Image (spheres, rainbow, N blue to C red):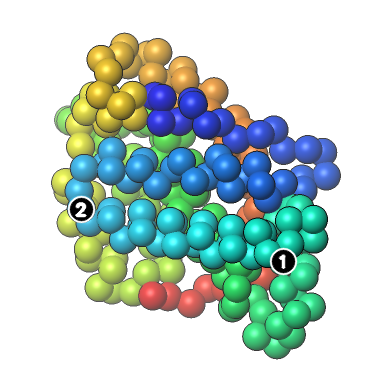
């Protein structure tokens, strides 16, 4: 569980302005989450998340005071790129990044809520399928969807997944689930705030890859 608990997300303020630096600091530790899922089919999501974090960080580092919040970045890029926005720059990178974060959030919430296959209660396949269908499926074409269908079949046992999240340490399942619930509080609020920002700014794009 150290993978999640050692780098928690900050509480979202009342105005729902997510601080860029704190967000990047926390999210940069999440790509190894996909190693915990076992299948190499998840490697492209991990790679995409890392690439999108790098793009957002490059924009932030170019002018930290100007890009103090994620909303500052979207507003500046909207003004900068005109008709090309939002399919450019850190705006596009964050759009895809939030989808990967939503996948993580729905998967963890599903496990924490005890959703399971009654015939195979120690598999997280139903949780992974729910997360994929909710967060990513509609943005993927037929080929990518089929790759993920294969990945779901290779989803690990829940016990192995929780052990991987705990960096190999033996842990009690209920202790793990309680820590997941703690992690999800600020993480979910952050992801929700980013989605809400994209809706308000009309920055969401629905093309498939």
Q: Residue at x 40, y 13 (%)?
A: 175
Q: Residue at x 33, y 24 (%)?
A: 166
Q: Residues within 10 Å of mark 1 (few under 14, many from 20)?
A: many
Q: Is residue 61 left or right of residue 151?
A: right
Residue 204: tell me if it is visible: no
* Residue at image mark 1: 74
Q: Is residue 167 left or right of residue 180?
A: left
Q: Nearer the viewer, residue 161 or 145?
A: 161
Q: Secondary structure at mark 2?
A: helix
Q: Position of residue 139 (x, y in %)?
A: 43, 68
Q: Position of residue 131 (x, y in %)?
A: 40, 47
Residue sitting farthest toward the bottom: 83
Q: Nearer the viewer, residue 118 or 150?
A: 150
Give me the C-alpha separation between circle 1 and circle 2.
33 Å
Q: Which labelled disc corresponds to residue 82?
A: none
Q: Secondary structure at mark 1?
A: helix
Q: Residue at x 49, y 25 (%)?
A: 5
* Residue at image mark 2: 40
Q: Residues within 10 Å of mark 2 (few under 14, many from 20)?
A: few
Instruction: Say if mark 1 contacts mark 2, CB within 8 Å.
Output: no
């Amino acid at each position: 569980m150290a993978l999640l608990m050692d780098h928690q997300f900050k509480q979202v303020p009342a105005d729902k302005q997510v601080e860029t630096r704190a967000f990047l600091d926390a999210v940069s530790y999440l790509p190894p989450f996909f190693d915990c899922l076992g299948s190499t089919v998840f490697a492209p999501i991990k790679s995409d998340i890392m690439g999108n974090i790098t793009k957002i960080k490059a924009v932030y580092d170019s002018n930290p005071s100007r890009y103090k919040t994620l909303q500052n970045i979207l507003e500046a890029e909207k003004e900068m790129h005109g008709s090309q926005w939002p399919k450019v720059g850190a705006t596009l990178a964050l759009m895809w990044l939030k989808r990967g974060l939503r996948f993580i959030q729905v998967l963890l919430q599903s496990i924490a809520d005890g959703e399971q296959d009654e015939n195979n209660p120690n598999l997280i396949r139903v949780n992974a399928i729910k997360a994929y269908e909710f967060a990513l499926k509609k943005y993927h074409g037929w080929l990518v969807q089929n790759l993920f269908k294969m990945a779901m079949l290779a989803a690990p046992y829940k016990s192995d997944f929780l052990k991987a999240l705990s960096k190999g340490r033996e842990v009690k399942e209920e202790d793990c689930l309680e820590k997941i619930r703690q992690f999800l509080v600020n993480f979910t609020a952050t992801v929700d705030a980013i989605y809400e920002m994209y809706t308000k700014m009309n920055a969401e794009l629905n093309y498939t890859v």
